[in-house]
Amino acid sequence: MSKKSYQIVFFDGDCAFCNKFIIYLIKKDKHDRLRFAHLDSSFAKVTLNNQPRIPDSIILYANEKFYFKSDAILMILKELNALGILPGIFGLIPRKFRDWMYDLFARYRYIIFGKQNNCIIPSRKLREKILE
């Protein structure tokens, strides 16, 4: 990578919903601030090696800090100015409750949305944002 500092989104590439969310984020990333890594990638394994209890759905690395679960989602959406004021409103909800809702959704995401055998990245331009 160049000297430009990217925020890195680690995601569950087996989850159909997660993949669609990543495609949404890539499209919203007009200023090329984000890079993405599947949680099972070599890059993720090395980068997340010292992290205790890694959730199996989404992690954000930004400003030399890791954000997990609902904090990761809110930080990403705020960075991209996505969904208007909703991330700010949800940020007012206590983290414990937000993470409980996040965990509930994460527990049933495969049942509701299904699994994918591989990560779907539709174009060369989008593939350039994926860290292996």
Image: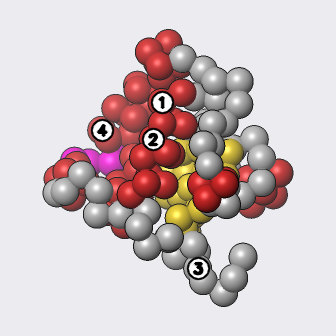
CB-based contact (under 8 Å), mark 3 and mark 1: no
Could you give the CA–CA distance between mark 2 and mark 3, rounded to whole angstroms? 22 Å
**Element marked by disc 3:** loop
Could you give the CA–CA distance between mark 4 and mark 1, rounded to whole angstroms? 22 Å
Q: Is 82 or 88 nearer to us in this picture? A: 82
**Element marked by disc 1:** helix
Quarter of the image with the C terminus is bottom right
Name which residue type carries label 2.
Phe
**Element marked by disc 4:** helix
- Residue 100 is covered by the magenta coloring: no
Q: Magenta segment range?
A: 91-96
Which residue has dot 2 on it? 21
CB-based contact (under 8 Å), mark 1 and mark 2: yes
Could you give the CA–CA distance between mark 3 and mark 1, rounded to whole angstroms? 27 Å
CB-based contact (under 8 Å), mark 4 and mark 2: no
Who's the residue at 50% across and 12% down the image? 111
Which residue has dot 4 on it? 97
| Residue 85 placement (x, y as % from top left) | 16, 57
Who's the residue at 53% across and 64% down the image? 34
Which residue has dot 1 on it? 17
Q: Is residue 53 visible?
A: no
**Element marked by disc 2:** helix
Give the quarter of the image for residue 81: bottom left
Name which residue type carries label 4.
Phe
Mark 2 or 3, nearer chain start: 3
Nearer the camera: disc 4 or disc 2: 2
- 104 relative position to 67: left or right: left
Could you give the CA–CA distance between mark 4 and mark 2, rounded to whole angstroms? 22 Å
Q: Is 72 or 121 nearer to us in this picture? A: 121
Which residue has dot 3 on it? 5
